[in-house]
Structures are given as C-alpha cells and as structure tokens.
Image: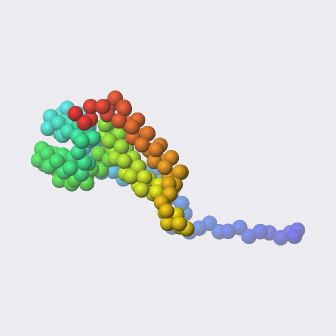
Amino acid sequence: MPGMSVPVPAAPPPAERSPSPQAARSPPPEPAVCVLCKYAGSQENPVVASVMAFISESAGKVSVGEISRQACIALNEELGAELTDGDVENHILTHSLDQRVVLSSILRDLVDIAQTVKHSSVVQDADTGAAAVDTKALLAYLKIVNEIQNIYKMESMKNLSK
C-alpha cells in the first residue's frame, strides 16, 4: 500500500555480530607435526633413514601393523620419542606418498574388495534354492582382478616380493 513503510530489522547486538575481517583471517592452530614426515627423504639421521627405507621396502611383504610395530620401536629408541604404532601406521597409510607404499595399500584394499564381491556374486534363488551367479557382481569382480593384475605389472611392484 502506498505510504506504508517496511520495518527494517535492528542491527544485532555487538556479541552476535560476525567476527571482524581481521579476526576471520587469523591463521588456524598449528597442526601436530608428524615425526616421520619431518624426516621423510632426509639423510640427517642414518637410523631414521634406514627405518624409512625399511617401511618402503617392506610395504608389499609385511602387514602394515607389523611394519608399524617394528618401526615404532626403532624410532622411539633413536629419537627418544613416544610414538605409538598408530602414529607410524597413520603416517604409512595417510601421509606416505612412496609409490610402493601407496600401491601396496591400494592392492590390499582391492584384494579385500575382490573377496567381498566374489562372495556376493553367488546368490541363492529364492524360489528354487539353487545357487546362481549375479552377473553384475561377477563383472565387477573381474574388473577388480584386472586392476590387481595391473598393479602387479607396474615396474615399482616387480621387485616387491624379492
């Protein structure tokens, strides 16, 4: 209607206002430093360098848990640190970009997935009780097996089992 005014909401009290642009630009808190990342690629400490080499060389031969356990013992003795097996395992699985380590982790994942898909590809017919093959699951299984074979064919993986 003409002549009517629309009410304008009042500004929020100071405590409810957005942070100032200066406050919004404050850096986030500094993350904890991964001890293994700190030494990655460094030859500064020969013992740590040999532990890092052990991790890379053992990636396709030994479980990540066992690698972590052994590396943790050596690192704690050498550095006087209080690392846990979980700290080392976290570095191996989420921080390490060493091709052998990453491919070994992917390979383990694919083998687990392949087993699950393989088991789910055989289904029991509800009417007859006869076993039947789910062709979609079977095709997915065969694709996973092909990817596993491709990883084994990679140059960096060829010497892993020696």
In this rendering, the answer to whether 88 lies above or below 99 is below
Quarter of the image that includes the C terminus:
top left
- The residue depicted at 26 percent of the width and 41 percent of the height is 59
Asked if residue 68 shows in the view, the reply is no
Image coords of residue 40 (percent x, y): 26, 37
- Residue 61 is left or right of residue 106, and the answer is left
- The residue depicted at 24 percent of the width and 51 percent of the height is 65
The image's colour scheme reads: rainbow
Image coords of residue 155 (percent x, y): 34, 29
| Residue ranking furthest to the right | 2
In the rendered image, which quarter is residue 151 located in? top left
Quarter of the image that includes the N terminus:
bottom right
- The residue depicted at 67 percent of the width and 68 percent of the height is 9
| Residue ranking furthest to the left | 77
- The residue depicted at 50 percent of the width and 52 percent of the height is 137
- Which sits in the foreground, 151 or 19? 151
In this rendering, the answer to whether 101 lies above or below 158 is below
Image coords of residue 95 (percent x, y): 33, 44
- Residue 66 is left or right of residue 91, and the answer is left
| Residue ranking furthest to the top | 155
Asked if residue 127 shows in the view, the reply is yes
- Residue 47 is left or right of residue 138, and the answer is left
Image coords of residue 30 (percent x, y): 34, 50
Count of marks overlaid on the render: 0
- Which sits in the foreground, 100 or 40? 100
- Which sits in the foreground, 84 or 138? 138
In the rendered image, which quarter is residue 55 located in? top left
